[in-house]
């Protein structure tokens, strides 16, 4: 269990002892090569030239040929950082010994706490509180270590390459796979921290520490449990605002992945759509695999926030050119036709059979003059309407024909690298020969090379989808007096009192009262049975009633079939030129109130045209959410229908989300349908679910 935000947030928490300690103690050091105490000790001894490393086991026997101590109390000096890898039964006492010896940071390798159930969770919570009371910090427990390349801190099971990426991971194997992929691209880690159970330090705490770390240029996160999700979003927003992109790999897109995460850590995995909403609110880039993460990290490292959407495709064969164009558009890129001037320029140094309209097909020019790749690339990068270039095909393999061609190909690769560096536009290269000397020269000069065309196209597509960091997380409003009744009338009046229009209505309990209410309201009316969660599905709604007999018949029928405690008689809304929407807010256990918007009425669950955002919303954010609907065109007017009043609709959405956010006792609140028309909008039904 993670401590609450109130318990965790104290001013100026110092993580220096965790990432740059004066000395390190390995508690549970071992000669057994099957134990963590051995693996961590092997890595720790690599940094003896930087700081003292003390090995501790209860017998005091030498470990890895080095002197060992029986406890931290025996050490010749205080050690800022204690790494504890002892059996779970002895973990608490080892922590107490470390705190008594003056440790200011603890890395808990030991497992066997919250991931095992209620009893372990209680032990973990008590332990984390004890560490905090002592003025120390705890990473873990059930974690896999920590690393800082700048301070030469090596406390993970495996060596990791240095570089500009700060990694926070809940999975050790995921970290190792990412390290191997990044190393192929000449990248590595400035810092690595294994999250473990996040009993004390959370993913948000670590993001904040990375944000102010000069050597960390990019932040990569693999997490299954975000703890205080809104704090995570706030921390990530701070990072992106300060120019440090956050790339997230998480699970939750399938039921199976959620089951796997729960069985692995006991963590609560939030729904994928909620996580997407959190990512948008913080400017986080979400990816689906370690290889996607590595590709985006490399692209961000090389090209930053440069635009990439309008791509020029350069190939040395028609097949590769056509496939590259299809994949580019699949991943969100645009492949526009070149203007006449650029096509004329390209035609000037290519053969008549070459394609010069986008894609560019060298059509055999490569083997005759491999330097043509650089000339064409320069023209494409200089074109003002080109944001990026996707190169695909045989480049890298021409050197197999002769030594002279091999030398020319390497020189051309070097020239291409210089062009990319000077023009500062994103370029991705797919080659059939990714391990050739020319391909390695491209990679060495900062041009990303891929073994598959889909990976190259997707890399540029991920860059193109990025938007400038503009954090959109609003603080939660102060709680209002709690709602005690979850009935329809109470829900309707709660939302109406906040400023959302509803048709005129009266609550009644008898047939005669219903008839009288209908007369007072006038015109056609709707009768709704109270006390039902889904009134339409149960036959508890009668529409378009006019006259006393129609109202009497509808109420009598509902009374016989449903025996409701009462009824609501409402004016029948004018549905002409209207679009029915659903606006709901669900309280997520990690991320708090989350807005759901979609087409409403009885079509909601059929069409599933929905969009999500963290609540509450501003009217501007509500407009952005409306534009994400597949059916957004309906709101702007189609086939002669007028556009709805978008300003009124956005304002109403903002009010609904504000009401829900101000009532933490409400688990779900929705207005469905919310009728949007050119004349404004009004709620036609509402419900709340108390949690």
Image (spheres, rainbow, N blue to C red):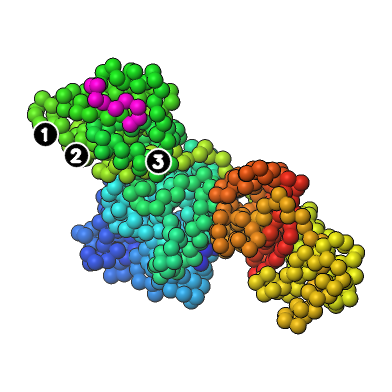
The residue carrying pointer 2 sits among few (fewer than 14), some (14 to 19) or many (20 or more) residues within 10 Å by Cα, namely some
Residue 192 is situated, as x and y percent measured from the top left of the image, at 38, 50
Mark 2 or mark 3: which comes first in sequence? 3
Q: Is residue 521 above or below residue 299?
A: below
- Residue at image point 39% right, 20% down: 340
First along the sequence among labels 1 and 2: 1
Report, in whole angstroms, how far the alpha carbon at label 1 lies from the one at label 2.
10 Å
Left-right relation of 149 to 286: left
Q: Residue at x 59, y 47 (%)?
A: 632
For the C terminus, the image quarter is bottom right
Q: Looking at the picture, tell me which residue is in the foreground, 412 or 26.
A: 412
Residue position for label 3 = 329
Q: Is residue 317 above or below residue 604?
A: above
Looking at this view, name the residue that lies furthest to the left: 402
Query: Does the magenta run of residues contain 337?
Result: no
Residue drawn at (44%, 66%), measured in percent from left and top? 255
Q: Is residue 356 magenta?
A: yes
Does the image show residue 472? no
Contact (CB < 8 A) between labels 1 and 2? yes
To which residue does mark 2 refer?
A: 433
Q: Is residue 142 left or right of residue 68?
A: right
> Magenta segment, which residues?
351-359
Which image quarter: residue 388? top left
Q: CA separation, marks 3 and 1?
A: 33 Å
Which class describes the residues within 10 Å of circle 1: few (<14), some (14-19), or many (20+)? few
- Which-is-in-front pick, marks 2 and 3? 3
* Residue under the point 56% across and 47% down: 628
Pointer 1: what residue?
A: 400
Residue 101 on image: x %, y % = 43, 60
Q: Is residue 451 above or below residue 33?
A: above
Quadrant hosting residue 605: bottom right
């Amino acid at each position: 269990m993670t401590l609450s935000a109130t318990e965790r947030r104290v001013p100026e928490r110092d993580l220096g002892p965790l990432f740059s300690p004066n000395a390190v103690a390995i508690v549970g050091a071992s000669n057994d090569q099957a134990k963590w105490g051995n693996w961590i000790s092997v890595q720790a001894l690599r940094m003896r030239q930087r700081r003292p490393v003390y090995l501790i086991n209860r017998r005091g026997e030498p470990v890895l040929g080095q002197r060992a101590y029986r406890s931290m109390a025996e050490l010749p000096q205080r050690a800022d950082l204690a790494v504890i890898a002892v059996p779970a039964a002895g973990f608490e006492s080892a922590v107490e010994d470390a705190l008594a010896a003056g440790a200011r940071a603890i890395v808990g390798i030991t497992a066997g706490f919250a991931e095992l159930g209620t009893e372990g969770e209680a032990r973990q919570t008590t332990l984390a509180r004890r560490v905090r009371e002592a003025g120390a910090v705890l990473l873990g427990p059930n974690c896999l270590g920590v690393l800082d390349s700048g301070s030469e801190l090596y406390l993970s099971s495996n060596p990791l390459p240095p570089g500009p990426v700060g990694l926070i991971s809940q999975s050790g194997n995921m970290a190792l796979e990412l390290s191997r992929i990044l190393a192929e691209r000449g990248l590595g880690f400035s810092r690595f921290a294994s999250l473990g159970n996040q009993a004390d330090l959370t993913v948000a705490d670590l993001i904040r520490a990375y944000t102010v770390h000069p050597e960390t240029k990019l932040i990569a996160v693999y997490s299954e449990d975000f703890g205080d999700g809104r704090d995570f979003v706030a921390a990530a927003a701070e990072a992106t605002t300060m120019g440090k992109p956050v790339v997230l790999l998480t699970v939750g897109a399938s039921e199976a992945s959620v089951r796997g995460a729960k069985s692995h850590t006991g963590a609560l995995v939030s729904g994928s759509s909620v996580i997407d909403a959190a990512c948008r609110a913080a400017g986080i880039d979400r990816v689906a695999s370690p290889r996607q993460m590595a590709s985006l990290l490399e692209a961000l490292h090389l090209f930053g926030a440069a635009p990439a959407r309008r791509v020029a495709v350069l190939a040395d064969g028609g097949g590769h050119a056509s496939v590259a164009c299809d994949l580019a558009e699949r991943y969100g890129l645009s492949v526009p036709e070149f203007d006449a001037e650029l096509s004329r320029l390209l035609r000037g140094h290519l053969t008549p059979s070459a394609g010069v309209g986008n894609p560019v097909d060298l059509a055999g020019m490569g083997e005759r003059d491999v330097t043509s790749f650089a000339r064409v690339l320069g023209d494409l990068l200089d074109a003002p309407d080109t944001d990026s270039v996707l190169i695909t095909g045989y480049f890298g393999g021409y050197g197999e024909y002769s030594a002279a061609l091999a030398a020319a190909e390497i020189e051309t690769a070097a020239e291409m690298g210089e062009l990319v560096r000077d023009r500062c536009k994103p370029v991705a290269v797919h080659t059939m020969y990714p391990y050739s000397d020319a391909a390695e020269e491209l990679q060495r000069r900062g041009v990303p090379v891929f073994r598959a065309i889909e990976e190259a196209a997707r890399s540029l597509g991920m860059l193109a989808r990025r938007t400038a960091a503009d954090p959109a997380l609003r603080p939660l409003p102060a709680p209002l007096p709690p709602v005690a009744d979850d009935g329809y009338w109470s829900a309707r009046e709660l939302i109406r009192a906040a400023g959302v229009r509803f048709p005129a209505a009266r609550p009644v309990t008898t047939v005669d009262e219903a008839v009288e209410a209908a007369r007072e309201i006038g015109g056609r009316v709707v009768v709704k049975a109270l006390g039902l969660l889904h009134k339409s599905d149960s036959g508890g709604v009668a529409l378009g009633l006019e006259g006393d007999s129609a109202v009497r018949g509808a109420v009598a029928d509902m009374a016989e079939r449903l025996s409701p405690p009462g009824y609501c008689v409402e004016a029948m809304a004018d549905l002409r030129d209207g679009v029915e929407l659903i606006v709901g807010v669900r309280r997520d256990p990690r991320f708090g109130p989350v807005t759901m918007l979609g087409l409403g009425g009885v079509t909601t669950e059929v069409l599933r045209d929905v969009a999500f955002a963290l609540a509450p919303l501003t009217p501007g954010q509500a407009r952005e959410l409306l534009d994400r609907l597949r059916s957004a065109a309906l709101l702007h007017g189609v086939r002669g229908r007028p556009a709805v009043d978008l300003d009124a609709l956005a304002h109403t959405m903002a009010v609904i989300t504000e009401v829900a956010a101000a009532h933490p006792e409400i688990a779900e609140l929705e207005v469905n349908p919310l009728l949007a028309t050119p004349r404004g909008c009004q709620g036609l039904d509402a419900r709340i679910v108390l949690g």
